[in-house]
Image (tube, rainbow, N blue to C red):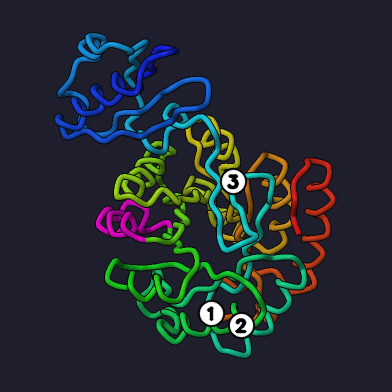
């Protein structure tokens, strides 16, 4: 529910209405500007009738929002959310952010080689799996805590922020210590116990779309995090499961446009997991930039033939550098900053 106050309404009129709403166990999300005082009502609004709010002096208009997600809704917040990571990275504005690195952290030497290369090419965040939730219990499961420590060490060494996937809520204290952006994998998108825990986190959350999730379900998962108090959510489209078997998943590039219409949250694309084929990554990345996404998360490996996971979808270092050059040409035309 959204309430707009009349022009010239007093602070006391506003406070009286807020006191009433809070007495009903409802939360307030202020969306006011210099021109108008507007706020959203969060919670179980079935306990109040919109027409009753007109009894309060200063109320101009009350609108019930039909979408089940509130804090993530464009109706509640018209301006785009920009999430800051460190002093010079902004996701959600004119900066097109590149996150790159191996699927799995395999060794200190491997991570250092890749991190230096992606940094030189223009990436600003180092991605890499320390904990690897895999479809098969026999597949490589990651270096776990050692992997987190290596990500932090190498990231600090070469000057890259760290993004990596958290598999369960009990690991949150470790991720708070070592990681700059906490990634939620596609299989965990509807792990609502984890979403609630991440709502208490101080870190930005990169929320991947579930492989069979609708856009509304995806935004509802973001709502879980935001309802807990953490409004630093970055959405990531990574391909959805369809009947097509040629690619690993089907990249729903239209989801970027849908999300930007429905929500104020930034949205990036993972072309690596969408395609599952390294030779498709460059074109899908260019399309992602053209359609208006705020960045990419791409898998890169110096020796993909011997990678412990996802070698087939990992770009070699020279190919990644060449792709960054092509992306920059398009970014200049679109008025985006790539590096």
Mark 2 or mark 3: which comes first in sequence? Answer: 3
Residue 66 in the magenta stretch? The answer is no
Give whichever of 250, 334 is nearer the camera. Answer: 334
Which stretch appears magenta? Answer: 186-201
Nearer the camera: disc 1 or disc 2: 1
Q: Position of residue 81 (x, y in %)?
A: 52, 42
Total labels drawn:
3
Circle 2: is it few (<14), some (14-19), or many (20+) Cα within 10 Å? many
Which is in the foreground here, disc 2 or disc 3? 3
Asked whether residue 313 is in view, the answer is no
Q: Looking at the image, is mark 1 or mark 2 earlier in the sequence?
A: 2
Task: Tell me where residue 53 sits by quadrant.
Answer: top left
Q: Secondary structure at mark 1?
A: helix
Residue at label 3? Answer: 92
Question: How far separated are the C-alphas under marks 1 and 2?
Answer: 8 Å
Left or right, residue 283 beside residue 151 = right
Q: Which residue is mark 1?
A: 151
Can residue 333 be seen? Answer: yes
Question: Residue drawn at (52%, 79%), measured in percent from left and top?
Answer: 152
Residue at the (69%, 58%) spot, across then down = 281
Q: CA distance from mark 1 to mark 3?
A: 24 Å
| Marks 1 and 3, the one that precedes in the sequence | 3
Above or below for 33 versus 51:
below
Q: Pick whichever, 224 or 22, lies toward us.
A: 22
Q: Which residue is mark 2?
A: 111
Residue at the image position 59 percent from the left and 51 percent from the top: 91
* Disc 1 and disc 2 in contact, CB within 8 angstroms: yes
The image quadrant that residue 338 belongs to is bottom right
Left or right of residue 210, residue 110 in this image:
right
Residue 181 screen position, x and y as percent: 49, 63
């Amino acid at each position: 529910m959204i309430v707009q106050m009349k022009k010239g309404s007093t602070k006391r009129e506003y406070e009286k209405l807020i006191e009433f709403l809070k007495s009903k166990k409802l939360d307030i999300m202020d969306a006011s500007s210099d021109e108008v005082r507007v706020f959203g009502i969060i919670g179980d609004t079935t306990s109040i009738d919109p027409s009753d709010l007109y009894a309060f002096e200063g109320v101009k208009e009350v609108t019930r929002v039909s979408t089940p997600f509130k804090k993530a809704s464009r109706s509640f917040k018209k301006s785009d959310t920009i999430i800051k990571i460190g002093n010079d990275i902004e996701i959600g504005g004119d900066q097109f952010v590149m996150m790159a690195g191996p699927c799995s952290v395999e060794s200190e030497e491997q991570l250092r080689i890749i991190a230096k290369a992606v940094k030189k090419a223009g990436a600003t965040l180092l991605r890499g799996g320390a904990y690897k939730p895999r479809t098969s219990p026999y597949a490589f499961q990651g270096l776990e805590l050692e992997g987190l420590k290596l990500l932090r060490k190498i990231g600090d060494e070469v000057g890259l922020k760290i993004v990596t996937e958290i598999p369960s809520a009990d690991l949150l204290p470790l991720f708070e210590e070592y990681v700059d952006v906490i990634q939620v994998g596609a299989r965990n998108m509807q792990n609502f116990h984890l979403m609630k825990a991440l709502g208490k986190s101080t870190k930005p959350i990169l929320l991947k779309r579930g492989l069979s999730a609708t856009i509304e379900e995806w935004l509802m998962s973001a709502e879980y995090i935001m309802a807990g108090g953490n409004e630093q959510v970055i959405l990531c489209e990574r391909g959805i499961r369809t009947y097509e078997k040629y690619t690993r998943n089907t990249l729903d590039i239209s989801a970027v446009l849908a999300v930007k219409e429905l929500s104020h949250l930034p949205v990036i694309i993972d072309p690596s997991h969408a395609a599952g084929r390294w030779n498709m990554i460059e074109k899908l990345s260019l399309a992602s930039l053209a359609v208006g996404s705020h960045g990419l998360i791409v898998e890169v490996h110096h020796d993909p033939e011997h990678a412990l996971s996802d070698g087939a979808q990992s770009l070699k270092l020279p190919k990644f550098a060449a792709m960054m050059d092509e992306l920059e040409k398009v970014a200049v035309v679109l008025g985006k900053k790539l590096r």
